Image: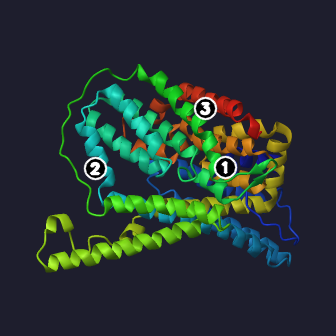
Amino acid sequence: MRRFSALIVLLLMPFAAFASTGAERLDLTGNWVGITSVLLFFVAYLAVMAEEFTHLRKSKPVMLAAGVIWAMIAWYYQSHEIPHVVETALRHNLEEYAELMLFLLVAMTFINAMDERNVFEALRSWLIRKGFGYRALFWVTGLLAFCISPIADNLTTALLMAAVVMAVGGGNKKFVMLSCINIVVAANAGGAFSPFGDITTLMVWQKNIIASNGAVDFWVFFALFIPSLVNWLVPAALMHFSVPDEKPNSGGEMIAMSRGALTIVALFLFTIALAVSFHSVLGLPPVIGMLTGLSLLQFFAYYLKITGEKTHARGGDAENIGSPVAFDIFRKVARAEWDTLFFFYGVVMCVGGLGFIGYLGMISQVMYGEWGATNANIAVGVISAIVDNIPVMFAVLTMMPDMPVGQWLLVTLTAGVGGSLLSIGSAAGVALMGQARGTYTFFGHLKWTPAIALGYAASIGVHMTLNRSLF
């Protein structure tokens, strides 16, 4: 049974967090607690993957599984009169999650603020009015997805570009399907080389890794720019000739950005700079810089409110100013993707529990001991096409294999772009299946998986060639 449990865990990649405390730990990999925990996580993840059909929010099953797993572990340790060990490990997991959650919460708040100020709608209306042909729009939306996702998250970027595609070519199902595939690949690739573009890259940066040949700092991730670009360009070039060579009807009304929109964009860029500076110069967690930037957005929200009130009191132009309380920062916080944030909590805690049980050493030995770092890191990307890349990367970061900077960049790349292999492999793909339901489908994406896999292999080859000095 122990080998069976290890096989399931290996397929799901549930490595885990445990801060070494020097206290006694029990190997529960062959115990009923370990086996039951693995099965619980397996069932919970099946429920997550079936979200499209069951409409059950993905956070619910993993949060329940996390609570049950840790309760069983704690009960077993208490029954053997080993106090505090489980509590210490659990608090370490919570600390890991808290940094990630607060960072993402700030980023989501800024994105929601820009959305409320019509930044994305203005971009979408401009693209629609330009009158691009289907093939030109295929490349324009792909390029914008690649360029925007390093700053915004790949999910928001994919939804924005898909909205353009649906508005312009909604009647041409072939164009919509191919464009959605292209957008998913481009958004995932664009996020891989920037700590702000993908959560897995953010996790690696926040970990402050000192590799065997240097530090994995903020700027080193940009060595992945060309490999990421290749990852998108190869399948895009292969799909180009299948895109209908036609021109849709242009038009549509022009949408202008609301008051303060460009200032909020500037504040977001400044907040990113603060996060980088706090981490690189002051040695503080990047989340402190993000929260400091959020305070500036709060002050700007107060400015928008009081100036709106004064203008209304004087009988000013209500159309341009809007409501006296036109910008409430806490409404933007409330609009954050809470289901996603709680999903991350469930995953981190489930993975942490399974690692605490003892599966971590077993899997680490198999992947990084027997397979070797390169093969293991390539496999991480393939597995992330089936399992969310968050537990995959959390696992690798917890194991902390002794690797050079080049290998850390390789696993960052593969975990970031591996999800493009299947439509269910990334949040962008899952979201677009809902947005373009019936047009962009699992099997429609699967048809182009060989082309995407070719781009995946090409990006790895380019990275290992261009950045060989980092290995």
Q: Which of marks 2 and 1 is in front?
A: 2
Location of residue 53 in the rendering, given as x and y in whole percent from the top left corner? 45, 47
Q: Which residue is drawn at 18% across and 75% down?
A: 311
Name the image quarter holding residue 69: bottom right
Does 312 appear above or below 346? below
Asked if marks 1 and 3 touch (Cβ < 8 Å), the reply is no
At label 1, the amino acid type is Val
In the picture, the quarter occupied by the C terminus is top right
Tell whether 184 sits left or right of 244: right
Mark 2 or mark 1: whose residue is earlier in sequence: 2
Q: Residue 456 carries which label?
A: 3
SS assignment at label 2: helix
Residues at marks 2 and 1, CA–CA distance in whole angstroms: 37 Å
Q: In the visual, does 308 lie left or right of 269?
A: left
**Distance of label 1 from label 3 (alpha carbons):** 17 Å
* Quarter assignment of residue 18: bottom right
Q: Which residue corresponds to mark 1?
A: 392
Residue type highlighted by circle 2? Ala
The kind of residue on which mark 3 rests is Tyr
Please tell me which residue is depicted at 41% across the width and 43% down the height of the picture. Answer: 432
Instruction: Residue under label 2, please give it.
Output: 122
Q: Could you tell me residue 40's position as x and y percent?
A: 66, 57
- Single out the residue that lies furthest toward the left: 315
Q: Which of 44/293 is in front?
A: 293
| Nearest to N terminus: mark 1 or mark 3 | 1
Mark 2 burial class by Cα count in 10 Å: few <14, some 14-19, many 20+ = some
Q: Tag count in the figure? A: 3
